[in-house]
Image (tube, rainbow, N blue to C red):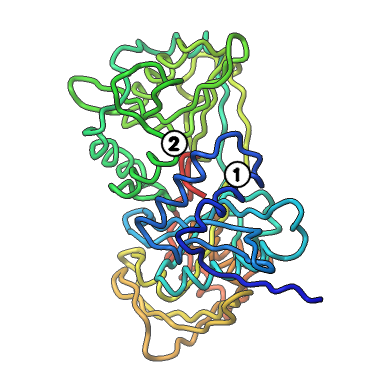
Amino acid sequence: MAKSVMVRAPAREELERAALIGQTAFESPEPGPWARSYNWIADNWGLDHLIVVEVDGQLVASLLCTPGMAHFSNDIVPLSAVGGVSTLPEHRRCGYGGMMMAHAVRVLYDHGYHTSALWPFSYNYYRKFGWEVASEHRSYTIPSELASKLAPPDGTRPARKDELPTISRLVARFARRYNCVTVRDDLWWSCIGAISGFEFDGSDDPRTSRCPWVHERDGEIDGCAVFNVSGEGEQTKVEIKELVAGVPEARRAILSRLAALGAPDISFYGPIDDGFLQELPDPGLVKVELHSGFQFRVTNPPAALELRSADPGLSGRIGFLVTDPVLGSVEFDVEVTAGKISRAKARAGERLSMDVQTFSQLYSGYESPVRAAELGRVQATSRSVLEFANRLFGNALPFRSLVEIG
């Protein structure tokens, strides 16, 4: 007998079951973060941002869409993370995850979230639904003995809740150099706090009172870190999920302070263009690795482009044909006037054709149109239109730290 399969939003009374699916699928020891995530999204954004698969009356798969806004250099664009893509072990390999991903694309499109990001377990898997690798980042593992000597640790302490707006401004200044960093508004902090269980009680023991730590100098906050501490004794680990500093000295001071937490070494991530090694007297003592980062997708190419600004000296018209595995092909033209992008009423003579995965890489800044054409992923009517597109998309690099949802 054929199974009855339905992809839909959960009812309020089904949230506990949906969260349990995620906890079970990811083999998470604690139910709290999963339950808090599902309830937070339902309370703040509505149940239609949660997706489940019902098979013969039983929920067997679930995922979360977490809306927000993201920096793209000096622009702000709607972005929804997709995460917690989960299927119970006994129901895997039935296509339920793919059903949810396709449904998620339509949900994001209908709700005006023109871009999306996720942390993949498999790049090939999510590529089938339009997401594509969008970044590379560096990971650093620095011995605590070395970190303790980088700078005086004075001024590094747990943040107070009333300092979150100041931290948000610090991150916003950092984000002007990059694409895809989520805007740290009140809702973002509320979401991260719910998931992570932040407690702003003034305790300096990060094992029992998790919250961001800041570095303060002359009364001004110039650095912030979000990190986890786990293990005991020689097995202690200090893993920094995000480290943002307005000046290099602030980052070194934070690392120096965290070196006192008892771990043999400290790990943190930085953008591909990060210059941390240049600050060190002996960079050979630091282990550096290059990682593929998050995946990114544009759900509505013309609407997403209209929210971006281009080179102020750029004017002209360009056409696009973008093929999408979920939403189908879209052909559109844009007009650029003194760096402002808008939909063109007349058809452009010069055009680019590509799949949405490639368009997403151009939009995120991970790939340039000229390079994508050299790889055979963009078809252009001329070399000049590729050079025009290079200036249209700009040259800011993509980056999302490990504190980002997805």
Residue at the disc numbered 2: 196
Residue 3 visible at all: yes
Residue 134 visible at all: no
**Residue 190: numbered disc:** none
Q: Is residue 325 above or below residue 47?
A: below
Instruction: Determine the residue positioned at 63% across, 66% down.
Output: 54
Instruction: Determine the residue positioned at 52% across, 58% down.
Output: 14
Q: Is residue 205 above or below residue 117?
A: above
Tell me the quarter of the picture where residue 223 sits.
top left
| Residue 172 image offset from top left, x and y in percent | 31, 44
Q: Quadrant of the N terminus?
A: bottom right
Tag 2: residue type? Ser
Q: Is residue 97 left or right of residue 316?
A: right
Q: Is residue 168 left or right of residue 117?
A: left
| Residue 316 image offset from top left, x and y in percent | 38, 78
**Residue 23: numbered disc:** 1
